[in-house]
Image (cartoon, helix red, strand yellow):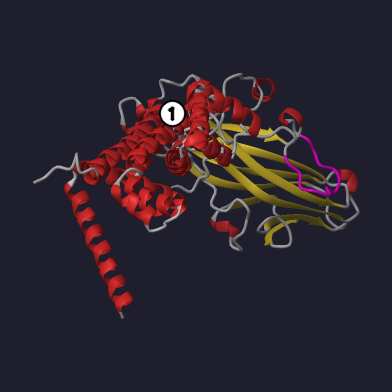
Amino acid sequence: MRNVSVQKKRLEAIANQTKKLGLAFLKNKRAMVGIGIILFFTVIALFAPFLTPYDPTLDRNLAGSGMVLAKPAWFRYLPGGDTLSENLDPVKDPEFSSMDFSKAWNVSITPAQFVSTWRTSALGTEGCLAVEFSRDGNHSPQVTFVRISSDFAYPFGGPPARFDTDIQLLVEDDDAIEVRPMFFIEDNTHGKRYDWGFGQHWDEDNITATTTQWTTPITKITSLAEIYDRKYRFNVEEDLATLMFSEPANYTFGLEIAFFDLPTNAGKDARVSVYVDKLDFKTYGTCFGLLGCEFQGRDIFSQLVYGTRISIYIGILAALVSVGLGLLVGLVSAYLGGVVDEALMRFTDALLVLPGLPLIIVLIAVLGTSVSNLIILIGFLGWMGFARVVRSQVLSLKERPFIEAAKAIGAGKSHIMFKHIVPNVMSLVYVTLATSVPGAIVAEAALSFLGYYDPSIMSWGRMLYDVQTKGSYEAYWWVLPPGMCIAAISIAFILLGYALDEILNPRLRIRR
């Protein structure tokens, strides 16, 4: 019963002390501001997958052209923003996954005597459109055209950064009926038409035999094609996106399939099937999302959000490593003294005089730029100053009467160090831990800025590295956010450290 009573009183004392500490934090403005900022970034880090659907490193070509940055979407509402465009994906069912494909596509056949169309699930990713030309020998051969199209409106006052298409065909042709596919875009407002064949440089190539795999245009149909291809097909050198989408207009795009049933086939049956899958067309805007896209088309807002995770993760773990090492070295050195103290302090002095950043760069180049290596190196090269501070505190504490009393009753060295001395330096540990996190965050940012980053993750420092490699310092929506985040979270931990020092250090505690 006595042990239970003692334990209960001990728990009550801890609860009262925790309550007092909490009240002291609530009264300290620095602590509240620091904790508020840290909680804000913690929420962003935890809910990153819900804040953005894009991967910060893998999802590329979301907007822009690779040559020009996509600005933030809110630029459209600023003066001069009326010429910016956003992504446009007019195709509702590019893979013909719906049985009623007529809701998304218009299909016309000229003449309609020998051609039938239907949706099949036997082929394609999620099904495909089957177009079959079938004529028996009692009918005369004739050329037939099938047009699969979709209408859309382009609402923007300026051209997109680029446009891309995705189309593939599979042909079953046992009777040598030539098939000629043509992709087209029609500007209905201005009465213009642009078409692309499936051959080299968009030539009009005929398919004359069964294809064993899905067929795509030899030269990809995109506005970013080579100048030679644009000049060869359209006799222009300018970007096709600028040529075709310079202002708001109504458009039609799609696929035309010509079945060349020639007179030489008269008197015999003729049959050929064409399966169409992934008939897609997209324009990519010159503005995108909250912070736009960088040159590889990756979402800058996603990079900022996921960079929060990495910076907090590296900062806290590296600070824990450095503070833990400093505490251990300083404690052992001061309490044991003698040869141990001399050896540990000379080793500490040797590390203190070494230039930190160049040493880390050399070690990172040798060991690799993984996140774990960054944490270990930043932590292992940041404990020396704290070790000296702990040593000076322990040298004073080990001469106190309560330590002499512990020795007198037979307490061992490890018991004295960890049960009597460590609790008396924990306030120093808490303060140093809080103030060490900003240094670790800045160290990671500096290494990433110099190009020593883990290529599989995105951090704020890596964002700044990408800015400087492209020389895009004028893109303030790309430059300022990571720099401001580094500054904000560093200030938050420093404020928290000052608040802890005021609360835990009796000499600095404000009495009211």
Along the line of sight, the residue nearer the viewer: 459 or 335 = 335
Q: Main secondary structure of the magenta part?
A: loop
Residue at image location 19% in from the left, 40% down from the top = 507
Q: Is residue 108 left or right of residue 350?
A: right
Along the line of sight, the residue nearer the viewer: 294 or 47 = 47
Q: Determine if residue 318 is in view.
A: no
Residue at image location 58% in from the left, 38% down from the top = 373
Dot 1 falls on a residue whose secondary structure is loop
Q: Which residues are magenta?
A: 205-216
Q: Quadrant of residue 330?
A: top left
Q: Which residue is mark 1?
A: 158
Q: Is residue 84 left or right of residue 222?
A: left
- Circle 1 crowding by C-alpha within 10 Å: few under 14, some 14–19, many from 20: many
Q: Position of residue 192 (x, y in %)?
A: 55, 31
User: What's under tag 1, amino acid-wise?
Assistant: Gly
Q: Position of residue 190 (x, y in %)?
A: 49, 31
